Image: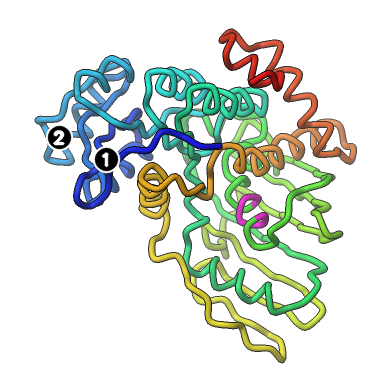
Amino acid sequence: MTWHLIPCGPQDPLRVVVVGAGGMGRAWLAAVTASPEAELVGVVDLDLEAARRATADLGRLDLPLGTDVVTLAAEAGAQAVINVTVPAAHHSVTTAALFAGLPVLGEKPAADTMARALSLAAASEASGHLFMVSQSRRWNPHLFALRDMVKELGAIGTLTTDFFRAPHFGGFREEMPYPLLADMAIHAFDSARFLLDADPVAVHCSAYNPKWSWYDGDAAATAVFEMEGDVRYVYNGSWCSPGAETSWNGSWRVSGEKGSALWDGENEPVLVADVRPAERPRSPYSDIAGSLHAFVEALRTGAAPMGEVHENVMSLVMVEASVQSARTGQRVLVDEVLQQAHAAAVRAETRPEVREVLLGRR
């Protein structure tokens, strides 16, 4: 799709409002402040005291604060929104911003359900404004290097990710039915799509909760995905695994016809094969700074960024299909999950113009 362009960049920074002043919101406030391509013009949070503390810690007591994104954006002269709310609020905040004429860069996931994510993709089309999801791992230079190695290995048989950490978050994550799958695994799933340049076909997933777990829901899971090209992607992880923890990026192995490639998630990946990868450009940015740069560039040039919502829903569907498989114990077809989500999105949609897009009438 195409979207309204904005003349922005280093010479004319994009004026943005950040919605959400929690831990991740503070990271985004720092990223925007550090970027030469963006200018922070306001902070939105339902808890104004939290917003005040965040701006005070940033040394920006001058920043306008508010509880409503559309109102504050208009008052502050914002050109775009960065949505760092909890997943359940992603749909309402992003929809309101898009139809107020504001492109949105949102924290993952696009929405808390596939149906709402499809609604947001349609809202982006109907409003004519960009909605990009920040899959921050996509910009890791080491991930780019690993992808280059994948291209040298010929046909790929298996890609695996091991992820073992033991974080004590408190709050909503520890109350989720499937915290690892719903909140964290999408980073690995999205990276797997990037590495293989392939989308998921089906999945069989088993989720469970070790007896010592401090999570209410299943904090561990193993998912086996059938990807396009008859490749298998295996994700094995736990959020309650103290000792010998992996990187937050996980530990990766690619097995191909000409050899293998390994990445510990932190250092340069290692190619174990009688081939030499061609020199290819890497991402000059990393993490959320990379997402912000891509967002600004997309608004300036119209080039489709990684994470544009239509592309990103194929990472989120891996989450929803995994959860469905874990619940039922059955192999789940991705196309069936997409069809179910589309039908649910049409039934729930309240905006006529968005419903028209969902029905293919625009």
**In this picture, is 241 found above or below 134?**
below
Residue 269: image tag? none
In the shown orientation, is residue 20 left or right of residue 360?
left
Q: Is residue 200 magenta?
A: no
Residue 14: image tag? 1
Label 2 Cα neighbours within 10 Å, binned few <14 / some 14-19 / many ≥20: few
**In this picture, is 190 found above or below 354?**
below
For the stretch drawn in magenta, what is the main secondary structure?
A: helix
Q: Residue at the spot x=29%, y=31% of the render?
A: 79
Of residues 167 and 57, which is closer to you in this image?
57
Amino acid type, callout 1: Leu
Q: How is the image coloured?
A: rainbow
Does the residue at mark 1 contact the one at mark 2 (Cβ under 8 Å)?
no
Q: Residue at the spot x=56%, y=61% of the render?
A: 245
Q: Which residues are magenta?
A: 189-193
Amino acid type, callout 2: Ala
Q: Position of residue 307 (x, y in %)?
A: 53, 45
In the shown orientation, is residue 190 left or right of residue 83?
right
Residue wearing tag 2: 56
**In this picture, is 157 found above or below 18?**
below
